Image (cartoon, helix red, strand yellow):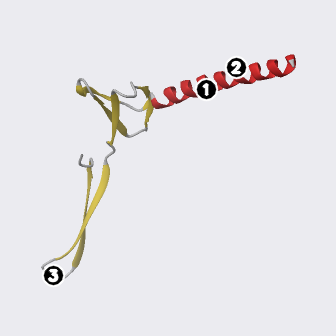
Amino acid sequence: MGSQQAAVSFLSNLAKAAFGLGTAATVLNTSLYTVDGGERAVIFDRFRGVMEQTVGEGTHFLIPILQKPHIFDIRTKPHTFSSISGTKDLQMVNLTLRVLSRPEV
């Protein structure tokens, strides 16, 4: 009878520890966010609005209910414009223009 009570007590303590550990892991997971290379994040705070500073690449902390990261791609992307034009002596010339630009937000 005593071994059954000890087993029940051990299992209930184990369940409480597992619940606490699971809760702590969930809170930690929701308070971390990652900004990849070539991206920037702007933090929106429910009390202060949009924060002035942008956040660079890496793993960062936030307050889960009060703050939310908005991640933007800032890499320059090439755009190529091609045109075929004729000259006065009736030859065809290929014209290609390559422009590097940032995406519109």
Q: Residues within 10 Å of mark 3 (few under 14, many from 20)?
A: few
Q: Residues within 10 Å of mark 2 (few under 14, many from 20)?
A: few
- Residue in the image at 86% along x and 19% along y: 3
Residue kind at label 3, given as amino acid type: Asp
- The answer for how far apart the CA atoms under marks 1 and 2 are is 10 Å
Q: Residue 75, how many percent across, how many down?
A: 34, 44
Residue kind at label 1, given as amino acid type: Phe
Q: Which residue is the site of mark 2?
A: 13
Residue kind at label 2, given as amino acid type: Asn
Which quadrant is home to the N terminus?
Answer: top right
Q: Which residue is the site of mark 1?
A: 19
Q: Foreground: 1 or 31?
A: 1
First reached walking from the N terminus: tag 3 or tag 2: 2
- Residue in the image at 35% along x and 34% along y: 69
Q: Quadrant of residue 38?
A: top left
Q: Residues within 10 Å of mark 1 (few under 14, many from 20)?
A: few
- Residue in the image at 17% along x and 83% along y: 90
Q: Secondary structure at mark 2?
A: helix
Q: Residue 17, how many percent across, how many down?
A: 65, 21
Numbered disc total:
3
Q: Which residue is the site of mark 3?
A: 89
Q: Secondary structure at mark 3?
A: loop
Q: Nearer the viewer, mark 3 or mark 1?
A: 1
- The answer for how far apart the CA atoms under marks 3 and 1 are is 83 Å
Please give left or right for residue 42 compared with residue 62 in the image. Answer: left
